[in-house]
């Protein structure tokens, strides 16, 4: 789906909001790609991010998927709005094992109030990429409630 | 639902596995309660765990919910097994704002292969508790594959 | 949760809308209970409603759960509004085998725009009741868009 | 994803099981396409299948999506097995309004025990197709439990 951002400044707005998500910096995630309706977030492996079998914890994998979807939607929202996640469902397809994860959020249905995103996370190991998470997410646009307080 | 753990050592087994989930220690989560089919995980507020509006990040809230459900299921599994999350769906009911979160995972349908859990997270602020997350989760029991490698 | 309906005429409004859901009449479902934020729908067994193993088809079980949740939310909406299902997730806990099903939709988080419901279906067989479906549902309230066209 | 069916007779096996799903015949659904890991089900409009605004009922739309996914998985299962839906999550993207619906179930992760499918339903109106449902589904393969009793 080809979508257009109504705010020409969308990429800077997404980057600015991402920088204020402390949790993303804390785990070491970085914004890898920002296009209208599509955002990617990359996360290098660290021992601190694992579950008991030394894979990435499913909650960590979900965190970057949730943020990727949230910012994919936010890229299409008006400059004066905020985004909140309403809900999501994720299926963990395989153990998240690798040097890094790449999460992709993609708007599949934009809307004035609600936006639906497809979520996916790939684990990259020795240059080989495996899908480890697939999800669907619902976002709500809070109009006239800018993401950054004055 | 009253359930019985087949392994009398279930609480120590859960605590041992939790201690090896690096991601739980990294965010500062602790095991608050372990009963057969019911586990609670507590997470104090830290600036590092927030999204752009200074609430707990939805992914962090989800992380402790996922682990609470996983260990609720694991408490009922045989001693020689492991647990993996197959999928979950969560609804974020309200901004996760408070001094701490309390996640509860509860088995609603135990099974030999698949176990279904109800997930809930409360945010505690000034002694007042608000439901911020509700979810449903599917777990799989990996028989004869102990959680801790020899 | 104790909730109050803002429209004193809520029960008649729900019954009227239900009567216009042709699909409910087609499968033989009937409204069994309507309270503010809680609706039950009953469905007697018929051979036409089964899957290949002669249990109720999961889609049929889901249909009455979806409608029960939708009307639980709608019971709390203003008289001049409509309800639409945004999304739901359901877990099928056991084969839906019995003389009849009873679906319960219950509002767990009312809201001006979005309402979250808990869904459950019990199968009744020889007077014994078994939970066969658990779910979570998101509804949207369309304000100033009455359910029944003039 | 290119997948191969282990049972060369998969298409006949799917058609045979579909014919025994009474609920599919009852609503007027027919099998439109059966490939390894991909099944489509078509459903013409009938007044009996609608909700209160005369769109297809969301539960009906979900029913054919659930069956399409179930048979997409079943096409890859061994001849001596059965399929059960464990859970699914669906997002309703737009009112299901049209002369007919076309549901597509597609295996995105096959597995010995669990199989994950992507679900989609298009509504066709005046030759124009609109995505009305997106979903994710988990199936379980019951080995050595043939779908058709002897």
Image (cartoon, coloured by chain):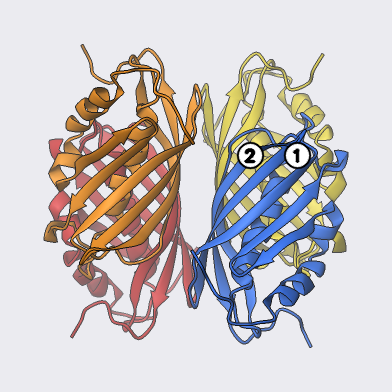
Chain colours: A orange, B red, C yellow, D blue
Element under label 2? Answer: strand
- Looking at the rendered image, the quarter that the C terminus of chain B falls into is bottom left
Mark 1 or 2 closer to N-term? 1
Rendered view: A72 above or below D118? above
Residue C125: percent from the left, percent from the top?
76, 66
Q: Closest to the observer: C10 or D143?
A: D143
Q: Which residue is mark 1?
A: D56
Decide if residue B8 is on the left or right side of residue C56: left
User: Real-space Cα distance between discs 1 and 2?
Assistant: 10 Å
Query: Position of B140 compared to C49: left or right?
Result: left
Q: Nearer the viewer, residue A12 or C77?
A: A12
Instruction: Report how many numbered discs are placed on residues in the image.
Output: 2
Residue at figure coordinates x 73%, y 22% from the top left? C147
Q: Are discs 1 and 2 both within one chain?
A: yes
Q: Is residue B39 left or right of residue D124?
A: left
Q: Chain of mark 1?
A: D
Q: Is residue D77 visible?
A: yes
The tag on residue D132 is 2
Circles 1 and 2: CB distance less than 8 Å? yes
Q: Rate crowding at label 1 as few (under 14), some (14 to 19) or many (20 or more) other CA atoms within 10 Å.
A: many
Point out residue C90 in the picture as x, y percentages from the top left corner: 57, 53
Residue A34 falls in image quadrant: top left
């Amino acid at each position: 789906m080809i979508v257009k951002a109504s705010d020409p400044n969308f990429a800077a707005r997404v980057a600015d909001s991402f920088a204020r998500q402390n949790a993303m910096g804390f785990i070491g995630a970085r914004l890898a790609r920002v296009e209208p309706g599509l955002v990617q977030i990359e996360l290098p492996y660290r021992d601190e991010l694992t579950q008991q079998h030394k894979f990435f914890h499913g909650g960590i994998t979900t965190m970057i998927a949730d943020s990727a979807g949230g910012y994919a939607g936010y890229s299409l929202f008006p400059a004066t709005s905020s985004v909140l996640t309403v809900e999501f469902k994720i299926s963990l397809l395989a153990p998240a094992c690798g040097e890094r994860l790449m999460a992709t959020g993609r708007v599949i249905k934009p809307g004035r109030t609600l936006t639906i995103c497809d979520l996916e996370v790939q684990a990259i190991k020795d240059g080989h990429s495996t899908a480890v998470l697939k999800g669907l997410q619902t976002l709500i646009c809070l109009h006239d409630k800018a993401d950054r307080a004055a």
